[in-house]
Amino acid sequence: MKWVEDPQHEDLRSGVRQVCSGFTGSYWRDLEPDTYPAQFVEAITQAGFLGALIPEEYGGGGATLTEASVILEEIAASGGNPAACHAQMYVMGTVLRHGSVEQKLQYLPELAAGRLRLQAFGVTEPGAGSETTRISTRAEKVPGGWRINGQKIWTSRALYSDLMLLLARTTPYEECAKPTEGLSTFLVDMRNAEGITINPIKTMINHSTTEVFFENVVIPDAALVGEAGNGFRYILDGMNAERILIAAECIGDGRYLLEKGVDYANQRIVFDRQIGSNQGVQFPLAKAYAQLRAADLVRFDAAAKYDAGKSCATEANMAKLLASDASWAAANAAMDTHGGFGFAVEYDIERKFRETRLYQVAPINNNLVLAYLGQHVLGLPKSY
């Protein structure tokens, strides 16, 4: 299958592929249903890719978000699952843009070297999914620090993360002039904080996701990122980066699934001819390819705006919407092409089929993306 790649990232793509070549489909299959890919994370860290977004002065790669998106795309296109890498990349933006000098000096070199992991993003709660401003986890000021009580859910990789970027309410919702006020971000040391309980959640995909409970967890003043009350604005930076990076993963997933589907369609003979000659097989693959190529262009547009410091919320949301739909189209086309063999674990179609389905729902539901575009771009009345 011919995929049009941007030539300026040829060396970067080649380097990622080289690392991924040591982690074939059998490696990822053996991790099912919920084993953390520790060997892969170590390899991608030592190659410098997990710390790519960390500035060079802190020991990182000094990469742009565009380059980070290429890294995750290639991991997905190799048949791997980038979930164990992406959180540290997009969470990093909040620390880089709003963290103190002391926080950066303390944590960034350790993260770049792989001695610390920042993979837990504590935002979503059972009673506040997409409506982030309704979170109820509280951080109350106490002498020398903050006391946290509450619960987070869908906090992937919390069991394997040394640090968590936590969003908590520091001013009660009712006392705020705007719902987005009174929220603060904290870097929580998961290794030493007492009162944290982490329970795994079994899911249809291997994301090592959990629910996390905070019971009178006391953290120091130095854990606060930026200014108290401005946390919602801080995490928006990370959310735009997250959507761009997830879009890149979806494009990588789509490439992988399309390649598998096209190869099988060219090889499989039924009624004395290749099944790829049948329009019922060929056209869904071709349409998915067109969808992926279009989504790819929007991904790069969004990433370029982010890297230039320009407003990119519209482009980031569109990239995530289009790429998640395109990868799901590729997944269905590959599954239909393989027929019964698509359900066989050894073909890796069913694994990728499950993985790519997530991104129409998370990290933001595609219906919310459409609501954002309708209201903020098209000027239509507010939906929800």
Image (spheres, rainbow, N blue to C red):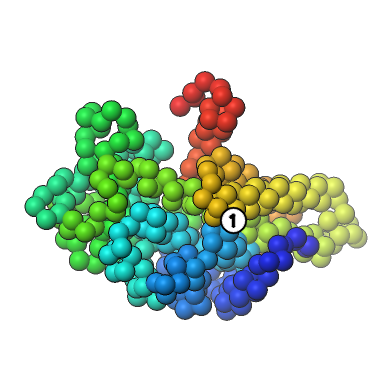
Between 32 and 317, the one lying in front of the other is: 317
Looking at the picture, which amino acid does disc 1 mark? Ala
Q: Which residue is mark 1?
A: 248
- Report the side of 240 relative to 278 (left or right): left
Q: Quadrant of the N terminus?
A: bottom right
The relative height of residue 310 versus residue 275 in the rendered view (above or below) is: above
Question: What residue is drawn where x is 53% and y is 69%?
Answer: 28
Q: Quadrant of residue 258?
A: bottom right
Q: Is residue 57 above or below residue 381?
A: below
- Residue furthest out toward the left: 143
Residue 307 coordinates in the image, percent (x, y):
54, 55
Can residue 317 be seen at all in this image of the molecule? no
As drawn, the residue found furthest toward the right would be 272
- In the rendered view of the protein, which quadrant contains the C terminus? top left
Pick whichever, 36 or 179, lies toward us: 179
Residue 107 figure quarter? bottom left
Residue 300 visible in the current orientation: yes
Task: Give residue 71's position: percent from left, percent from top.
Answer: 57, 65
* Residue at 28% over, 28% down: 177
